[in-house]
Image (cartoon, helix red, strand yellow):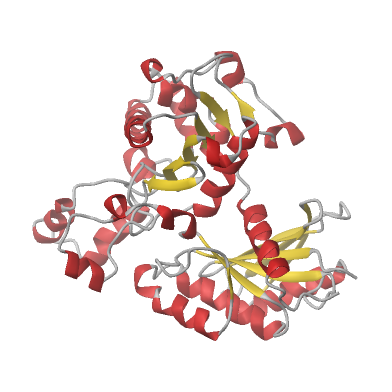
Amino acid sequence: MTATRVLVLNSGSSSVKYQLLEMTDGSRLAAGLVERIGERQSRLLHTPLASGGERRERVEEFADHEAALRAVSGELDADGFGLGSPQLAAIGHRVVHGGQTFTRPTLVDDAVLAEIERLIPVAPLHNPANLTGITTARTLNPHLPQVAVFDTSFHTTIPEHAARYAIDTATADEHRVRRYGFHGTSHAYVSRKAAELLGKDPSEINAIVLHLGNGASASAVRGGRCVDTSMGMTPLEGLVMGTRSGDVDPAVVFHLVRVAGVSVDGVDELLNKRSGLVGLCGDNDMREITRRVGEGDEAARLAFDIYIHRLKKYIGAYCAVLGHVHAVVFTAGVGENSAPVRRAALAGLEELGLLVDEERNDAEREGPAAREARIISPEGARVAVAVVPTDEELEIAEQTYALVSDAGSPVRH
């Protein structure tokens, strides 16, 4: 029996998201979430997609990630898809930060684990949880290949003049201060799918990818390789996001510490969790914000305008970076679903060849059609404007499966 399935794990500090995919056709066999790990009322939600069964829910204490993953394994076992299944080729793990070390998906061994641990200082909120997920999965099935797929790897092609900050080189090198970028699996997947939509090879097009969700980032992709991205050393830099400020004068931090008496941790919490859209108007849901704008809410209008202004600046900047742009591509929750954001982001950029067709942009799609890539620019437009639904889990699964298949790893037959 050929092993053609990949389990994708995304381990957070108190949660585990997972999907099981069949790689012969990219279909989902099962998906789920464990949340509130370490609390007395943990919850596991599991959906057996292959059988079309109803979602199952368990509320009980999962003391740690091992207990949570054992419960996930049990749910998969009940559907015939457990971690011991001979059809399971590998587990693909989302790892947020790979630094400059990991430029591609990597088979996990002790040396890889040590390097992910060494990178914790530059990703203290994410890498520890990602590491825990990997070590736990290895414990549950030591013989199953584990593959780390890094959010940063797609951005390792950014040239030095775009990746370095203009600070003392020795200090930057000693403390690994540079632009790393994030959402890499999404940018890789979407830029490739955009090329397919245009009937081109990725090497033939230049694209600006706008990943607009609660976290938001932009990238400039030349011939399939990222040459610039808005997020930096951390996911805080760049666009206005749901709760993150994006770009801000670094001296704001000094001012808040010295003058306002805010602690360093307090500034960190402010900029990451109490800024962005929620800081500006109290909402981080773009649907609610656009509803409020329609009702004449001035705070919502200002938040929307700030969001669009920053987005438009990055679009213009990346047009300059790329020189010639074949496509601007919207993706993720806001990018895929908010026609007002897409319309406003490109308004006034007609001289750059950027236009949206109002009917195409406003067309609402439901069911399977909602997951199809589409062009929303007018026929004959100089630059294609597209909406391409992202699929980070499929991208992780495909990279994982390609690696274990090509590497001759101990995939069972």
Which residue is depicted at the point 53% across and 71% down? 130
* Relative vertical location of residue 383 with respect to residue 260 in this rendering, above or below: above
Note whether residue 284 is visible. Answer: no
Residue situated furthest left in the rendering: 259
Viewer-side residue, 83 vs 38: 83
Give the x, y percent position of residue 359.
Answer: 60, 14
Give the x, y percent position of residue 31.
Answer: 73, 58
Note whether residue 10 is visible. Answer: yes
Which residue is depicted at the point 47% across and 35% down? 206
* Relative vertical location of residue 271 with respect to residue 309 in this rendering, above or below: below
The C terminus lies in which quarter of the figure? bottom right
What is the number of callouts on the image? 0
The N terminus lies in which quarter of the figure? bottom right
Q: Image quadrant of residue 336? A: top right
Viewer-side residue, 74 vs 279: 74
Give the x, y percent position of residue 227.
Answer: 39, 46
Q: Image quadrant of residue 284? A: top left
Viewer-side residue, 284 vs 114: 114
- With 331 as the anchor, is 266 left or right in this view? left
Which residue is depicted at the point 38% across and 43% down? 278
- With 123 as the anchor, is 364 left or right in this view? right
- With 32 as the anchor, is 112 left or right in this view? left
Give the x, y percent position of residue 320.
Answer: 32, 32
